[in-house]
Amino acid sequence: MSTHPRILIAGGGVGGLALAQVLHHGGLDVAVYEQDPTPRIRNQGYRIHIDPDGNAALRACLPRAALDRIRETSGVSGDLVAGYTHRLEQVMAQTFPNVPADEITHVDRNAFRAGLLTGLTDIVHFGRTVADYRITESGRVRVEFAEGGTDEGDLLVGADGVGSAVRRRLLPHAEIADLGIRCLYGRMTITEATAALIPDDFYRGFCWAADESGCGAGFAGVRFRTRPEGASDYLMTTLAATNERLGVTDEELYRRTPKQLWQLAVEATADWHPTLRELFARADTDAFFPITIRYARRVDPWQPGPVTLLGDAIHTMPPTGGVGANTALRDAATLAEQLLSSERSRTDAVAAYETIMLPRGFDTVDQSLRLAGQLFGRSA
């Protein structure tokens, strides 16, 4: 039996896997439990923006093999963020010249998870959902799985996303609020025929178009540096609006098939510029799914102990700032730094992490909400 502390991580997403990598290679006994039945991502999105903070956290957390794999399968670097009217009139543009060749600017979710899983085959357990936990008399944490069975460790890290079961037990008073925006994620496979439809700027980074009603659409290309097996280059097509603007209730929205959601996006942009309409019309009809845009309300610090939280499990934020994954990566790097410090007890390490993570995470939520207000005309 290992004499090292045993760290249980609920959730095998961006933050959970980055944390597993750095703790495992730091010599700790780590087990990750992920509810997805396979490594393939469920409906959470397609393209993830990686900023300089995210790059720094990846370098701090990952061994060379994993980092190289992620870089090799990342998207060709972009240098532009731009905004347009629904008539395709540019209203703002910000360029990022001289991006270092080895810098990662964006990744595909599935390729990213595959890279983060490098070398963790025996550590990550798929199809295992942490449903609850309790603190034992000895001060350890015993987790219970929805599928049956238990495991026990010295520290439990809830990295299990917006619906976190760990957060519900640790902070039953914590609130996750609905921003009132529904997002239809989709994509258009880039082929010889569809490539000609994409404006040059849309290849360069993230571009946002919106009409006067608050309905907006995001477009961003993913052209792999090295294409993973079975993958294709694509343009992410994302439509965001209220239920009222879409003309459907939540019950109707979440009951619709991918093709019906695609049709809804086509109808919602029927009076937009022909180029934008064509991008939705030529999108993959089986690739659409809906997401509710939510955010976490700020919570006060709690008494540190053998359970903590990371990423969306504690500071869920709208995707408008493009920083959710980067904040989770920073959480992982910060927590690992504290846990691997020989000068701190485990409780002190968790306390030091939470002192940094909480204000940083919720300040980032606030920034994302301010941007959401600008994009959607709605404040939290």
Image (cartoon, rainbow, N blue to C red):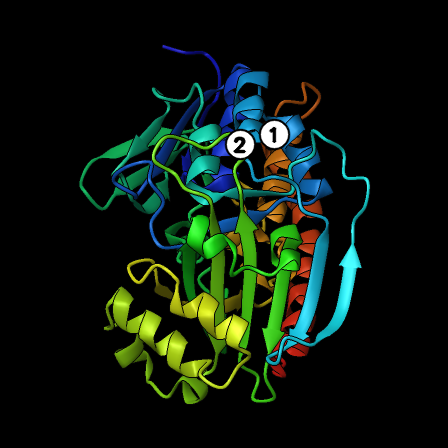
Q: State whether residue 160 is above or below residue 150.
A: below
Coordinates of residue 302 in the picture (x, y in percent):
59, 53
Residue at (65% x, 65% y) in the render: 368
Residue 172: where, in percent of width, then height? 44, 62
Would you say the residues marked 1 and 2 are in contact, meaning their CB atoms lie under 8 Å apart? yes
Left or right: residue 147 versus residue 206 is left
Quarter containing the C terminus: bottom right
Residue 336 is marked as: 1
Q: Secondary structure at mark 1?
A: helix
Left or right, residue 121 beside residue 178: left
From the top left corner, tell me how far across and down residue 183 is, in percent: 45, 70
Asked if residue 198 shows in the view, the reply is yes
- Residue 267 vs residue 359, the one in the foreground: 267
Residue at 32% of width from left, 71% of height from top? 261
Residue at 63% x, 53% y: name it.
323
Identify the residue under disc 2: 19
Name above or below for residue 194 compared with residue 250: above
**Does residue 56 lie above or below 308 as drawn?**
above
Q: Does residue 146 appear to the left or right of 122 in the view shown?
A: left
Please name the amino acid that badge 1 sits on: Ala
Above or below: residue 358 compared with residue 331? below
Q: Nearer the viewer, residue 110 or 266?
A: 266
Which residue does the image show at 46% across and 44% down from the upper left? 233
Q: Secondary structure beneath disc 2? A: helix
Q: Earlier in the sequence, mark 1 or mark 2?
A: 2
